[in-house]
Image (cartoon, helix red, strand yellow):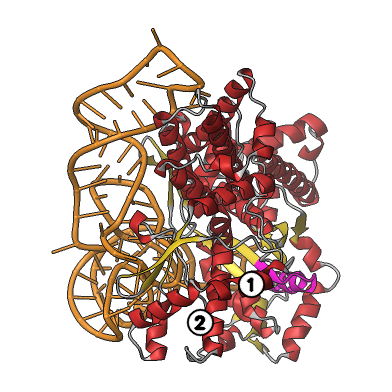
Amino acid sequence: MKTVLLKWIEFVVKKAQEAGRLTDAPCLEIPLETPKKEGHGDFATTLPLILAKVEGRPPREIATQLAEQLNNLALRESFEEANRLKDGSPLPSFEKIEIAGPGYINFFLTKASWHQELINILRADKNYGRTSEGEGKKVQIEFVSANPTGPLHVAHGRAAALGDALARLLKSVGYQVDREYYINDVGGQMDLLGKSTYLRYRELYGEEINLPEEGYQGDYIIEIARAVRGEESDRYMYGPAESHLPFFTRYSYETILGWIRRDLKTFRVHFDTWTPEAEIHQENKIDAALKLLESKKVLFEDEGALWVKTTAYGDDKDRVVRRRNQKLTYFAADIAYHREKFERGYDRLINIWGADHHGYIARIKAVVEAMGYAPKRLQILIHQLVNLLRDGKQVKMSKRSGEFITLRDVVEEVGVDATRFFFLMRRSDTSLDFDLELAKKATNENPVFYVQYAHARVCSIERVAKDRDWDIEDVVHNITMEELALLALPEEQALIKQASRYPDLALSAAEALEPHRMTFYLQELAGMLHRFYFGHRIIIEDAALTKARLVLMRAIRIVLHNGLDLLGISAPEQM
RNA sequence: GCGCCUGUAGCUCAAUCGGAUAGAGCAACAGCCUUCUAAGCUGUAGGUUGCUGGUUCGAUUCCAGCCAGGCGCACCA
């Protein structure tokens, strides 16, 4: 609806420019919003206010002139002629076009236009809201990527929900999306993990142990040690530790990665690719990346270490890629990893990182640019950490001390749907309070139920209608514009309008990488549905009106379903 | 000290790339179930958008400087 209207305005502006009524100033983007106030029409543009400066004329004068052209029937015909070829939806008919305030143009659409949109929703059904703006470009989203040294905790859950919702959103607007998990299976942390398990294992045999300060303290390490004892008995009690540690490292790593995979699966987050850092270290991938940097003349040696001059690209200090002891840094692998991602043919890369990694952005962007990739192609989304509360009191969590609440704990208590919705309700760059007690309540304080209940409610209405011998599918597929004309109440109009905003909302949420907009939208739509339900009966004596309202309900159901689906949340038919 | 993020109703948060009178939920108070699901609905109340300037027709939004909070500033990953 909005898209076609935008095209129409664009068309009129272009014609005006051709006719010399407007200067040829390149009009970047035409603003078109849905006003908050009823009296301001269905859509409004501030275009005249923007043009006023370039034109050197009062905005109202420009508005008057544009409005005249927007009402011009001959122009309209030629637009429709041009547009028909591109399978555009029909241009809505206008009740009136009005000039208001300092120079707004307000569009009032006829009721019939809105009824037509209802039919569009029903026809598109599960595809309603899907667009092709992404033009099939390839996007990769790398997220979670938690170190395999412990179970996923709550903040990882936020990243998982965010990345998955973004993937769904981008896919729905026409991108080809891959989800990727980068496994940091290299480095001192892995040795420490193996050592921690080994010590716990010895402890099981009665030995007094001293876990190193930096070691992993969590009970899950003991759990892994027990598993080793179960499978291997006491064979690792003998001989030097050094010869056993690799086994313990690998065993712990595999066990934990198994947990991570399992928990993500439970959370309904699927990854297309799991890339171990170790893989990057093989096959000379790092050498190749460093050679590329060398050819760009950004590598230099100092004090026996190899550095990359990231300050040349906006970083605040240069970074080491090979230490004095000749070991490569994590950063070196990350450079090679990003190079590989670009070489795999992605148009866009999106990394989702926790706020504690934000200091890393400048250097990775610098190095990407240094390698010759447009820095715009890499977007890094930072999500602030999660404040876990219990009864309003902060729970301090630290993987090292072993005191934390896992994603799994939360999902088991609260459920996948509620957990995902909670994580997605807030903008990612604000910190998130997650009160376990509150979330566990799962009552009406939890907004996911509000939205799901709206969907279930429509389904319930349809069940009752069927009991009373309504053939819903027949009604939905064979409704006519004449029958829909019975939907004349302001509440009905408002519901249709809100539902029609859905495609535009999905698009803007995807473009802004802000899934939280969808949660707010759905709450609004659900609220309108509940209010309508309370004020009006759907199935009534008047068969014609019943028919029209059943169609309206179905349209709302479709939008609620599709919206929840974009968030990876189920739309139950019964609650 | 430097950098990034955030300051909006008592609390948690929105606000459509700068638009018209800044909106929801929770908490509080008063109501609504013989009806298609009360996990719902109706009503009341709540604001100098952290502070001070600037940019312009117009600022919660952009810029500068303060104030407060969070996070980061490794030849760790």
Question: Mark 2 = which residue?
Answer: A316
Between circles 2 and 1, the one closer to the viewer is 1
Residue A346 magenta-highlighted? yes
Q: Position of residue A228 (x, y in %)?
A: 76, 35
Residue A208 magenta-highlighted? no
Question: Mark 1 = which residue?
Answer: A378
Q: What's the residue type where badge 2 is placed?
A: Asp
Q: Position of residue A495 (x, y in %)?
A: 47, 44
* Residue at image location 57% in from the left, 76% down from the top: A75
Instruction: List the single residue furthest toward the right.
Output: A283
Q: Position of residue A139 (x, y in %)?
A: 70, 65
Instruction: List the single residue furthest toward the front.
Output: A74
Task: In the rendered view, tell whether residue A336 sits above or below residue A113.
Answer: below
The range drawn in magenta is A330-349
Q: Please say if the residues under marks 2 and 1 sit with CB atoms less than 8 Å apart.
A: no
Check disc 2: other Cα within 10 Å, few if <14, some if 14-19, many if 20+: few
* Residue at image location 35% in from the left, 82% down from the top: A61
Magenta stretch: dominant SS?
Answer: helix
Which residue is more in the foreground, B75 or A534?
A: A534
* Residue at image location 67% in from the left, 27% down from the top: A471
Q: What's the residue type where badge 1 is placed?
A: Leu
Which residue is more in the foreground, B17 or A334?
A: B17
Judge whether residue A414 can be spotted in this image.
no
